[in-house]
Image: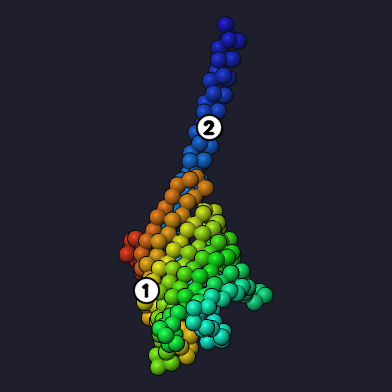
Amino acid sequence: MKKKIVNTKLLFTVLIAAGLTFTVASCKKDSTSTTAATVTEADAAELTTDAITPETGGMTAQLSSSTTIEKTVVLSCGVSKDSTIIKSSAAGASPSYSYNLNWNYMLTCNGIIPSQLTFNFTGTGSYDGARLSSKDNSQGAFTLTGLPPASSQYLFSSTYTRTGTTTSKIARQYTFTSNIKITSSNIAVDKTTQQIVSGTAVVTIAATSTSGKTFNFNGTVTFLGNKKATIVLNSGVTYNIQWS
């Protein structure tokens, strides 16, 4: 009888230990899963910053390519042209980027007077930013007006999209798929400096974590000139960005 009681105590002790071990492991797993599943608004703001700044091959770099084409390429009314633009940052640069884009563009005229220049491009790229790195497919559709020499500014209507796989480089260091779209009808670019001087854009962001949960953000980008802009997303918080 005594031997049977000892075995029962041992079994009870083992079961308790096993139960505690299971509980701790289970809680740890749930906590990790919940953390990994969250794409924050700060992540979305950083994603928007990287989609805009030239240091990460963003929209401002493509607007600059558009004005360069207008200034340097011989264009004829109604004649479509194609080109491939391959660019990358200098070796050792941080942030860094590379992209390969196929461009198509055409000048439209009123009679013989140029009225607008339209651009479409698609391609692939990657960047390694301060807080995020990403491999993306990108595409854009720009319409440039203000072509007559008397005008001191170009005016852009634009749509720019990046879709890809993004990895956080800080804190949780998790991976998510992302789709960001930036649209505008009033981006003004100085013809002499080829820099944005004003304008606003609507931004929409969809991000999906590895758990399959989707996070949606939307807001406004305001270009302030002097290579500065602000981003305001769902919460109303203002994020300031600047590029060189």
Taking the image as shown, residue 227 lies to the left or right of residue 125, namely left
Residue 41, given in percent of the width and then of the height, sits at: 41, 59
Q: Residues within 10 Å of mark 2 (few under 14, many from 20)?
A: few
- Looking at the rendered structure, which numbered label has been put on residue 22? 2
Q: Residue at x 53, y 69 (%)?
A: 121
Nearest the viewer among 14 and 146 is: 146
Q: Residue at x 64, y 77 (%)?
A: 90
Label 2: which secondary element: helix
Which residue position holds label 1?
Answer: 185
Residue 6, given in percent of the width and then of the height, sits at: 58, 14
Q: CA distance from mark 1 to mark 2?
A: 57 Å
The amino acid at mark 1 is Ser
- Residue 76, above or below 237: below
Residue that lies at the very extreme toward the right in this rendered image:
91
Q: Residue at x 58, y 10 (%)?
A: 4
Q: Residues within 10 Å of mark 1 (few under 14, many from 20)?
A: some
Nearest the viewer among 159 and 207 is: 159
Q: Is residue 207 visible?
A: yes
Taking the image as shown, residue 7 lies to the left or right of residue 59, namely right
- Residue 233, above or below 112: above
Quadrant in the picture for the N terminus: top right
Give the mark nearest the N terminus, 1 or 2.
Answer: 2
Residue 171, given in percent of the width and then of the height, sits at: 52, 57
